[in-house]
Amino acid sequence: MSTLLDIGEREIIRRFLSPLVDGLGDDCAQVQVDAGVAVLTTDPVPIPAAYVIGGDDDKYWVGWLLVVINASDLAASGCDPIGLLAAIECPSDWSVRVFERLVEGIRDACLAHKIRYLGGNLKEAGIFSATGTGIGLCVDRQPLSRSGATSGDLIVLVGKPPAFWRDALAVRSGRQADRTGPLFRPIAQNEVMAALSRQGLVKASIDNSDGLLPSLQQLAVASSVSITLDLVQMRGGGAAALGDSDPVRLMLGWGDWNMVCAIDPVNFERVKLVAKSNDSDCIVIGVADFGSQVYWGSGDHKTVVPRLESERFAKDSWFSEGIDGYVSRLMAIPIPEA
């Protein structure tokens, strides 16, 4: 008898969930309401990188990440965020101060993302867990989705890559952790994506929280395009303060909470200007074409990108190996020169 591990998350969705839900497969669900289109997402909080890599078990970072992981999905839709609900289960023998730190993280991340905390549910449990539900609204425009990219579009990263893995590798090598950076305080791209959406500058988008390669692959499938990465542009766009590290390699990993977007080339300068005005950036990483694969390299050296997967219920997902296994995979990927 086959198991869920045998078929993987995406086949589970395709076979069992998609027949029940229209539009399943995007970062957010969409519901038409009188005021426009309501956008909703729900995600449990994982163990924060602040603890897994930074070694800090303060529950403040759990509360912060609970907000970010849901806010980032809302950002992919280009909506205006409304609020966050949180269902929290925690042991009854937690100290009051530990719980207070969790709530302070939720509060501060909501303030940073201009999202209201709307309450939710609280109950005792043997182990801690928390699941957030983010709510947003698109008025006078349709939410963005993973479909919509066409041949000739530029593929860009909106955000500030690759700061996360720059900091993460520095900490893993023994340097002092920067608690103001994305390793501890990641910021989702809500304001810039809402601004770009209002101006009609993005054709398709996906949250990059699972890593660049799986995000590109999902965008390509949803939009029925191929994507060829431009490694020269990527190295030029993300080369600041990285020492000897290849910025392309650092961009491949999860953690920066960027958006992968398809845009019309004629709009690139406008997109970059909007990004900078919202304390973000826009880096060209490739181009869309006819087909269905994701490639890198050029000429005779053009090849399909390898699989560096965060898929759930997948035998080759890094979740089965933990953070050390993921870093080993990330650092071992052979990357073409151009």
Image (cartoon, rainbow, N blue to C red):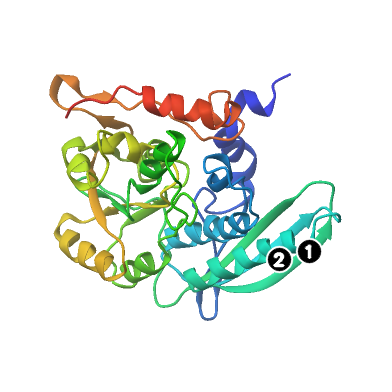
Left or right: residue 195 compared with residue 268: right
Three-letter residue code for mark 1:
Val
Q: Position of residue 291 (x, y in %)?
A: 28, 34
Crowd class of label 2 (few under 14; some 14 to 19; many from 20; radius 10 Å): some
Disc 2 is placed on an element classified as helix
Three-letter residue code for mark 2:
Glu
One can see residue 219 in this view: no
Q: Quadrant of residue 60?
A: bottom right
Q: Position of residue 311 (x, y in %)?
A: 53, 35
Q: CA distance from mark 2 to mark 1?
A: 6 Å
Q: Position of residue 92 (x, y in %)?
A: 86, 56
Say whether marks 2 and 1 touch (CB < 8 Å). yes
Disc 1 is placed on an element classified as helix
Left or right: residue 250 compared with residue 236: right
Work out whether residue 2 or residue 326 is closer to the camera in this orientation and state it.
326
Q: Quadrant of residue 98?
A: bottom right
Crowd class of label 1 (few under 14; some 14 to 19; many from 20; radius 10 Å): few
Q: Disc 2 marks which residue?
A: 100
Up/down of 242 relative to 178, above or below: above
Q: Quadrant of residue 331?
A: top left
Which image quarter is the C terminus in? top left
Q: Disc 1 marks which residue?
A: 96
Work out whether residue 2 or residue 212 is closer to the camera in this orientation and state it.
212
Which image quarter is the N terminus in? top right
Work out whether residue 72 or residue 293 is closer to the camera in this orientation and state it.
72
Q: How many marks?
A: 2
One can see residue 298 in this view: yes
